[in-house]
Image (cartoon, helix red, strand yellow):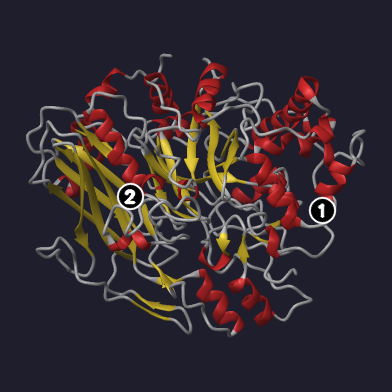
Amino acid sequence: MRSITYLLTGVLALTVIGCTPEPPTEPAPDSQSEKKTTADEPVVVTRDPHKRALFGDLHVHTSWSTDAFLGGNRVGPRDAYRFARGEAVELPSGIVTQLAVPLDFTAITDHAEGFDVIAVCTDEAHSQYDSDACENLREPDNVTDFFISAFERGIKRPAPRNETLCGPGETGVDVCIGYSRVTWERTQAVAQEFNEPGTFTALIGYEFSSLVREFGMLHRNVIFRGTDVIPHAISSNDVRNQADFFAQMDAACQQPCEVLTIPHNSNYSWGLMFSRTDEDGSAYTAADFERRARLDRLAEVTQQKGESECQTGVGTTDEDCGFEKIFEPCAPGQFGRCASETSFLRNALLNGIQLASEGQTNPFKLGMIGSTDTHASDPGNTNPRNRYAQASNVPFGLGVKRLFEAAHPVVGPIRRTGTGGLAAVWAESNTREDIFDALRRREAFATSGTRIRVRFFAGDLPAEVGSQADALAIAYERGVPMGADLAAGLAEPRFWVWAAQDPNVVSLDRIQVIKGWVEDGEQKHTVRDVVCAGGRVPGDDGRCTQTGASVDISTCEVDDSTGAAELQTTFVDSDFDGEQNAFYYVRVFENPSCRWTTWIANSASVDLPDDVPATIQNRAWSSPIWTQQAADERLSLGSR
């Protein structure tokens, strides 16, 4: 059935079965045309010491990911980079489209676990091209069975390699690694070809995709600073557990190699992503925590398979934590296909400062980014009206109904998935070095798909800092930005938050601050509005009244005249304790607009499912600012 195809190509592979895929649109991995690189030419790039917001996507799959390939995607990395740069590209759906505003940076992060298969099975000149293993990839008898079989193999540690393709034993392992390196080198070459300092940044990366039972995942995107990278893309085929992944990555990426590992979809980790123990139950050592603190500097808090900041009823009563959720809270003793506390970033941040208060290194000192996790080679394509295609052989209304009823064995109900998020940084320039350094220092923020801009500072700031012409100079000189540690010694630091709407969408509703701290060994957190549009003022409960904006569900027309193009304020924490381990981050809310499911339901004149909201309040999340963190002061990013 190929009805509303390619909403999430690959992720939704089971709903897009039907037509025989066309041959790959790009040369095979080991063809000579793919091995050449474009030499860097000297470029003069203007740098802004006060930095500017750059938007990108660090989680992008193309036809070089086996799950996307199985879903019918034959659009390779070159076209994906072209799409990111704003060019019109024909997507797997057959639609030719382009971004309204180009991205500033992108990383193609195809799954390393399939690099060997892709290298062999998409190259007609390869001796194994006509093997049964390759035929089964290109034209599987049953895609559902293929996925289930892949997961059954993938939950083993190390995940077994393809003996049918590479042969048995250690010799077969070496053969598979050799095939994988072909795709890895090709990935680097294409990124180098499209990297244009000052204009567009193509970061080199890939995805590490270890699987757990009940179709769970412990996935990380691996992003490198420059062209000095590891020789072999370490995958779940190589490691015994998560600690082994960090140890191998740390050993392989020695100077001048620099790398970040960015966890995502912790909501599908069944509590394992942010647990104090490894996936096999073994305890993390102090060395494990130290490596993880250096490598895991950020987490992908939102993408098309849901949002992982927090969940109402899972360690919090925060009603705004009900945003874009896939699973219900776990019942007592339940493992898998449910939401548990150590699957969410806010709880991880709390666990991290508790570890710090116990004198340990904080392995969960994480900034926030978003990305799409697209499997359709279209980075940054978060437009809710641009995520589906009408099949010629199925009536549109019937196709939409089928889509709303569809459930992927891995992802779950398709209707609960989203359009994906974006990663944003405050960087001096649009270059690999400046963007990577901004990510590493966590001067980064996430959005749920729109281009809200948000700044967040704390320190010895004047109350009127936001109204001064040199506000940014003052903020950087007398304070610290998001992602940093607040200097000790301030009795009452002042916080400054500023946000601006995406000019192409609805206006802003409000800004919240979330504080987490540990008091007498107990984890606590608060949520309060600090500034709201339309003259609304937070009440005694710390909340503003509901926005006056409205949405006509039948047409998706928005009346947000009470919203704001910009919001900013300064505030102090009357309960601030300089001796307490704590963190602060902000959420910025847009006014409501139609969710993608409403757009498509209206287009097809079908009823919207009862279990998905008609509207969505898109938002941005800043990275936190931390206080105290005594144990982390021993951590040197430049040492091993």
* Residue at 85 percent of width and 43 percent of height: 134
Q: Which residue is mark 1?
A: 140
Note whether 241 is above or below 553 in the view shown.
above
Q: Do tag 2 and tag 1 residues touch (Cβ < 8 Å)?
A: no
Q: Quadrant of residue 460?
A: top left
Q: Does residue 137 appear to the left or right of 407 in the view shown?
A: right
Q: Does residue 160 appear to the left or right of 523 in the view shown?
A: right
| Mark 1 secondary-structure assignment | loop
Task: Give the mark toward the camera: 2 or 1.
Answer: 1
Mark sitting on residue 129: none
Q: Amino acid at mark 2?
A: Val
| Mark 2 secondary-structure assignment | strand
Q: x, y (%) of residue 458?
A: 20, 39
Numbered circles on residues, count = 2
Q: Which residue is mark 2?
A: 454
Q: Amino acid at mark 1?
A: Pro
Q: x, y (%) of residue 60?
A: 60, 46
Q: Residues within 10 Å of mark 1 (few under 14, many from 20)?
A: some
